[in-house]
Image: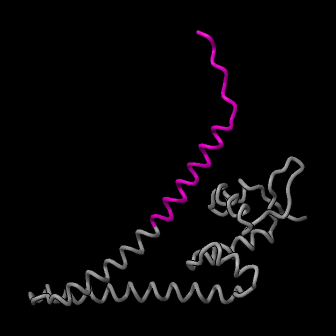
Amino acid sequence: MKSYWKVGDLAHLTGLTVRTLRFYDQIGLFSPSGQTESGHRLYSEADLSRLHQILSLKELGLSLEEIKSVLTGGQLSPLEIVSLQMGRIKEQIKMQQKLLEQLEHVSKLMQGQAQVTVEDFTGLLQAMKKSFEKLVIERQTIWERHLDQLGDFLAEESERPKPKEENQ
């Protein structure tokens, strides 16, 4: 028996918002395989696999239009996607390792009460800035996801029938 998920269930399963899934459908990036008799979206296991590809490509920094192009043209295999992700992680590790080395260098200079040069200091500041910018982007993405979820919740709440107030 094949498993199907409604849009809310898929959103909960993937951590995406209902709004995001509907937007992906609207732009033709990710559409459900079926629908219920009442018109609710139904997603299959194959849909879930496609969504995983979309999220992987998005994680690599591709725009939604680029992702759509890749998925329709078949330009990247799953192995290539994994390889790209590994490369991105290796680059992050290199950047963090460089920052650590610069911090250790400045720390040794300070411990030996040696003069920290302008080059040492500016190099350290640049490495810290790059690291901080990456962190800010990651935090912004998390906050945007939370705001989308809040928007979905508020939209669902506004659609619920309100209890009638008793006349006082």
Residue under the point 41% across and 71% down = 135
Query: Which quadrant of the structure image shows residue 107?
Result: bottom left
Q: Say whether residue 92 is magenta.
A: no
Task: Give the quarter of the figure containing the C terminus.
Answer: top right
User: Residue 87: where, in percent of width, then height?
Assistant: 54, 89
- Where does the magenta region start and end? 139-168
Residue under the point 73% across and 79% down = 71
Q: Main secondary structure of the magenta part?
A: helix
Q: Nearer the viewer, residue 23 or 147?
A: 23
In the image, taking residue 135 as reference, residue 168 lies left or right, namely: right
User: Residue 80: where, in percent of width, then height?
Assistant: 66, 89
User: Residue 64: where, in percent of width, then height?
Assistant: 63, 72
Task: Give the quarter of the figure containing the N terminus.
Answer: bottom right
Query: Which quadrant of the structure image shows residue 79?
Result: bottom right
Residue 145 vs 128, above or below: the answer is: above
Residue 31 vs 168, above or below: the answer is: below
